[in-house]
Image: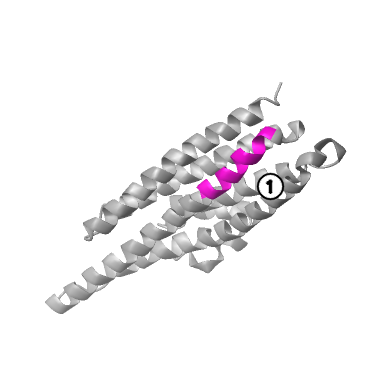
Amino acid sequence: MTAGPDLARLDLASFSERLAARTPTPGGGSVAAYLVAAGAGLVAMAFRFTSGPKYAAVEGAMGERASALEEIRVRAIELVDADSSSYDAVTAAYGLPKTTDAEKVRRTAAVQRALIGALEVPLETMGKAVAALRIAAAGAPDINKNLASDCATGSWCLWSAAEGAALNVKINAASLADRGLAEMRLAECERILREASALAESARTSAARHLP
């Protein structure tokens, strides 16, 4: 069964059933993308509630941050399907005939192209996760204290998304014939992971100050 471009339209119960099914997709990459959407949405909600007379000094900035997070959320939902589609392309490439030398050459080239796609999508997911974490960390110190737990939870969703997507980058990079490209992407992956970890801890610590 192919995931197809319809995962984002599923309800949560159906999506979880698709995850549990004995099919290659959707998998961890799609879940990582969904965690970006969930985390960005949750932090945006917390920022939107940081409004009113008590928060007049920061309300404008919080609104701008919420809008930026909404853009990330929308793209992350698209990445849920994009990740599954990219892995389906890898599966299809490995299924190409390899009887003759010419077929073997075409199959190898197709596999390598598909692997690059399957690597680039989770790398974009990581980029969206860290972009959302930058916003979360910037706004967390001024959060409405009643939404502090939501901001912290959203931040950890974003951190988990970066960690999960990184695993997909690494596993696909391991099979790339172009080792120069693989090493470049792995270095970028590690840089994003370090930043994501620091930002998530910063957001969590700031939000925790408002908790009992």
Question: Is residue 208 rendered to the left or right of residue 59?
Answer: left
Residue furthest left as drawn = 101
Snapshot colouring: one colour
Residue furthest top as drawn = 212
Q: Nearer the viewer, residue 174 or 85?
A: 174
Q: From what the image shows, is residue 34 above or below residue 47?
A: below
Q: Does residue 133 show up magenta in the picture? A: yes
Q: Quadrant of residue 2?
A: bottom left
Report which residue position mark 1 lands on: 44
Task: Give coordinates of residue 184: x percent, y percent.
Answer: 30, 53
Mark 1 residue crowding within 10 angstroms, few (<14) / some (14–19) / many (20+)? many
Q: From what the image shows, is residue 83 above or below residue 138?
A: below
Helix, strand, or loop for circle 1? helix
Task: Give coordinates of residue 156: x percent, y percent.
Answer: 56, 37
Q: Main secondary structure of the magenta part?
A: helix
Q: Does residue 204 show up magenta in the picture? A: no
Task: Give the residue type that dot 1 points to.
Answer: Ala
The quarter of the rendered structure image containing the N terminus is: bottom left
Q: Which residue corresponds to the image point at 33% horizontal and 66% vertical from the top-left?
A: 114
Q: Nearer the viewer, residue 31 or 204?
A: 204
Q: How many marks?
A: 1
Residue furthest right as drawn = 53
Q: Which residue corresponds to the image point at 70% horizontal and 25% vertical from the top-left?
A: 211
Task: Give coordinates of residue 191: x percent, y percent.
Answer: 39, 44
The quarter of the rendered structure image containing the C terminus is: top right
Q: Which residue corresponds to the image point at 72% horizontal and 43% vertical from the top-left?
A: 47
Question: Is residue 107 rendered to the left or right of residue 207?
Answer: left
Q: Which residues are magenta?
A: 129-141
Task: Give coordinates of residue 94: x percent, y percent.
Answer: 27, 66
Q: Which residue corresponds to the image point at 63% horizontal and 52% vertical from the top-left?
A: 69
